[in-house]
Image (cartoon, rainbow, N blue to C red):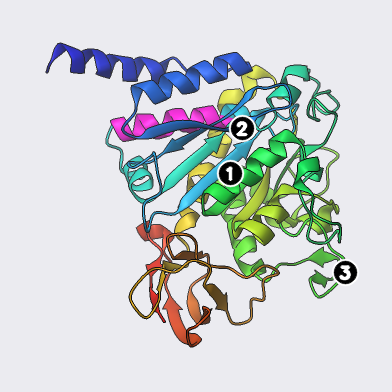
Amino acid sequence: MSLLLFLSSLLIVASVVALEFRYHNNREMESFLLQVNASNPDITHLYSIGRSVRGQQLWVLALSVRPERHSIGIPEFKYVANMHGNEVLGRVLMLQLIDDLIRGYRNNETWSLQLLNSTRIHILPTMNPDGFDQSDTHCQYSQGRFNQNGIDLNRNFPDAFANLPLDEKNLEAEVQAVIGWLRSETFVLSANLHGGALVASYPYDNSNRGREWVGGASLTPDNDVFVHLAKVYSFGHASMHKGDGCEDGPAFLDGITNGYQWYPLSGGMQDYNYVWAQCLELTLEVSCCKFPPAQQLPALWSANRGALLAFIQQVHLGVKGQVFDGSGVPVQNAVVEVKGRNNMSPFRSDKHGEYYRLLLPGNYSFTVAYPGHQTLTETISIPYGPDRYAALQHDFRL
């Protein structure tokens, strides 16, 4: 082994071992991400999606065997933490997850090799660094929830149910950054991490009491998939599935809830992801205390680790492929619809001609439409893909 290679391997090990179970401030977090990226350029790519109101970078670390750009057939997954600045456990979990994935890959552990070979994982450890700077350690009522302008970022996204004109110039800097991020990548599955409860919440968060409103819940056309995804997290968690994890809090059957049924909110991020970005997102409430005591962090990581990994694996649910025109060229904006699932904004092929549909095992009728071509209808039998780290591959040829 050459001296340079030996020293590089020591740097990699040092960068991983150095991570402690504590709350890192924004400067320390940035240093950690820069060090990890410099030490692991083959499997990490650090980039910024924008800046906060106070000008702090919104850093994202991508992890994959091809981390710098999208690869055809490899789904894009993301985790977002610390949207509310005073809900801080997600920051710790995301840094530990980065540490865990890299350590596993360097040790040739099968679980990490399979994830990074089959998936491109994007991690945004803090969406609200300004709020975090203002937060204190009170369990429930600490300051720091809002951004520097005093705005709740999880009430600031365009809302399909609000019937308001869309003027993105009036959105907060952090929200504009996330929207731009969603337009730059075709994300398939996502979760945003919060604190103050112990439950996996799924869309919709809002309703105008139309056809989506069922028995006090606001249900998406993909409700069966969302319930499945929520249960994957809750049952992968040490105790969330029990449904009664927090004192004085509501009980949640199986540790999951429809967002609107829990409490309605307008301008939420998970609804925006689903309606406008074709990305199925959950809101994960991962700790009863918004700012847990530091000595509890190792146990909280242990409680969430299995669920975080199992949830990423669900990006391989359903079917994926490309849409080609009559000349065999991939086409963008072909409408790819599943019978019985009438989405507000139809799922479309992206700039690579790719589509991804998260679906439970079964037989589904697909309709594919593209201007100047005859509409195509096909029935597809879809197996369970996550165990194989691969959704069913099926291309459509118009």
**Picture coordinates of residue 107, whole percent (x, y):** 28, 31
Looking at marks 1 and 3 on the same chain, the residue that comes earlier in the sequence is marked by 1
The quadrant in which the C terminus is found is bottom left
Mark number, residue 209: 3
Q: Which tag is nearer the camera, tag 3 or tag 2?
A: 2
In this rendering, the answer to whether 366 lies above or below 9 is: below
Query: In the drawing, what numbered circle is on residue 276?
Result: none
**SS of the residue under disc 1:** helix
Report the disc number at residue 50.
2
**Badge 1: residue crowd in 10 Å (few <14, some 14–19, many ≥20):** some
Q: Can residue 24 be seen in this view?
A: no
Image position of 92 with respect to 17: above or below: below
Tally of marks: 3
Label 2 element class: strand
Cβ atoms under marks 2 and 1 closer than 8 Å? yes
Which residues, given as a range, are shown in magenta?
Answer: 93-106
* In this picture, residue 140 sits left or right of residue 313: right
The circle on residue 181 is: 1
Instruction: State which quadrant residue 15 falls in.
Output: top left
What x and y, as percent, mark residue 386? Answer: 43, 59
Query: Viewer-nearest of labels 1 and 3?
Result: 1
User: What residue appears at the point 82 percent right and 53 percent down from the top-left corner?
Assistant: 262
Q: What residue type is labelled 1?
A: Trp
Residue found 39% across the figure and 68% down from its top: 330
Q: Which amino acid does label 2 sit on?
A: Gly
Packing grade of label 3 (10 A; few <14, some 14-19, many >=20) is few
Mainly helix, strand or loop, the magenta region?
helix
> Residue 100 colored magenta?
yes
* Spatial separation of the CA atoms under disc 1 and disc 3: 30 Å
**Labels 3 and 2: the sequence-earlier one:** 2
Q: Where in the figure is residue 56, as x and y percent of width and height? A: 65, 22
The answer to the question of whether label 1 and label 3 lie on touching residues, with beta carbons closer than 8 A, is no
